[in-house]
Image: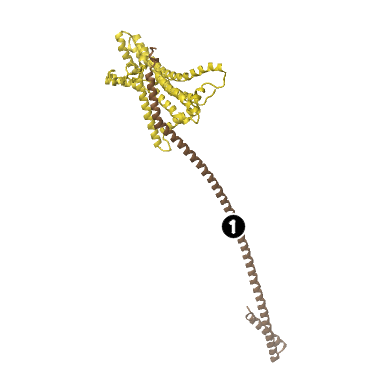
Amino acid sequence: MMWFTAAVQAHGAAAAHAASEKEGFNAGETIIHHIANSAEHPLIPLPEIFGIDFSVTKHVFMLWLVALLVFVVVTWMVRRHLKQGPVPSTAGSGLETVVEFVRDSIVAPNVGSKWVDTWTPLILTFFAFIFTANLIGLIPIFEVVRLMNHWVVGADSSTFLGRLLEGGTTATANFNVTAGLAIVTFLAIIVAGTRAHGFLQHWKNLVPSGLAWPIYVLLIPIELLSMFVKPFALTMRLAANMTGGHIAILAVLSLVFLFAEMARTAIAGIAVGLVISIPLAVGISALECIVVLVQAYVFTLLSAVFIGMAIHVHH
Amino acid sequence: MNNPLVQPDPGLAIWTIITFLVLLGLLTKFAWRPLLRALEARRETIRKAMEDAQQAKLELEQLNKRSTEIIRNAHAEAETILSKSRDDADRFREEMKEKAREDAEAIVREARRRIETDTVRALRQIRNEVADLSFEIASKLLQRNLSKQDNEELVESVLKQIEAERPASLPS
């Protein structure tokens, strides 16, 4: 239902824009507006450094929010759990189960028992951060905030409060964010290989030793490419999965306005919404609930696998 | 590259890296390390507790074995004591019976002996008394010199007299 109201509001904004140009409802434009990083209206505009815009946008704000939430919740749970003594509470057991699952089922089999303590914190943070970011994107609380601003507060988008209340977004649905996370994995792979084998040996490990030189001519470019393909795949998989569900939900909800326009009556739109759009959107949302967990798990698992590959070289 | 879905935004990527690394540092220091250390410590505690329990179980088993042995020994000993005391009692009873029989025999023998001596004494007394009576009768016969019938009557009367006096004169 919240997606529904959000879409109604988004339509309102688009309609106001469209009215001036005497155009109809543009589903594509509405969806893009909803998903894209609003770089043209940053929360805190900052000057460019070396040609890079460091302005705090909606996505950066969401990253901070997620990081803060993860830090507060996890630290609070751990503190409470450690104070509990040797016998854990229900919440403590859940926390332990997750942490031990990540350590014993994701990290340990890949990086080995020698390095498990080194890389478990990174993998745990990946999992907590990505899962929370995915999940916050799934909960349409920020659309409610946006509607509240629209109806109650009425802050203009020229003010900081107005921009802050403009609404939230799924940070991990933006491939710049996932690229940032994948760069962390990329660096972690190099650090892991360097720490396990030394700096030079890590780079030598990229290709198997003792082959004829024409094979190296082929192999070295392939292995170098594979080094960059790994984080690129991580980037695209997570961003595309997070974006895809949102686009699907918005597209299904757009049917309401398209049909209302076609039939020139709101009743047609409402009927389509009740019969098709809302059931479909609910179904996709249910699917997304699984997807947010699975994608956080996949990113985490693959990062552990890649780090493990740098430590245990198999050719 | 006008599609906002794939618009490169290095600023956002760098903000992501910074945010993530800060979060990683803070969580590692305040959450993951303490938690992992606590998990490890508890695993160690549990392992030790289980070893202790195993040890205690072994000790308990040994104690059980020992106590079973002690109880078995005690049973055997009790059995020995019981059978021994039963034998003692049997022997004692037999001895008592034997002694009683001997006592009884002694008493009977004594009684017989006394009866015999008394009988001898009584017979001797009777004999003496008969002699006395015979003497008396003879003296009386001689004194009165009576007819044969009278003599017989006299003898008869004397004998009756003796008969009448005899039980009183017999020893008990």
| In-image side of A164 versus A100 (left or right) | left
B128 above or below A170? below
Residue A140 visible from this viewpoint: no
Q: Chain of mark 1?
A: B
What's under tag 1, amino acid-wise?
Ile
The C terminus of chain B sits in image quarter: bottom right
> Callout 1: 10 Å neighbours few (<14), some, many (20+)?
few
Task: Please tell me in which quadrant of the rendered image residue B118 appears.
Answer: bottom right
Residue A199: x, y in percent?
Answer: 48, 25
- Mark 1 residue element: helix
B64 above or below B163? above
Q: Colour of chain B?
A: brown
| In-image side of B118 versus B59 (left or right) | right
Residue A133: x, y in percent?
Answer: 39, 23
The image shows a total of numbered marks equal to 1
- Which residue is labeled 1 in the image? B81
Residue A59 visible from this viewpoint: yes
B86 and A153: which one is in front?
A: A153
A110 and B122: which one is in front?
A: A110
Residue lying furthest top: A22
Task: Please tell me in which quadrant of the rendered image residue B82 appears.
Answer: bottom right
A147 and A64: which one is in front?
A: A64
| In-image side of A189 versus A260 (left or right) | right
Q: Residue at x 52, y 43 (%)?
A: B55
Residue A48: x, y in percent?
Answer: 34, 18
Q: How is the image coloured?
A: by chain
The N terminus of chain B sits in image quarter: top left
Task: Please tell me in which quadrant of the rendered image residue A59 appears.
Answer: top left
**The chain shown in yellow is which?**
A
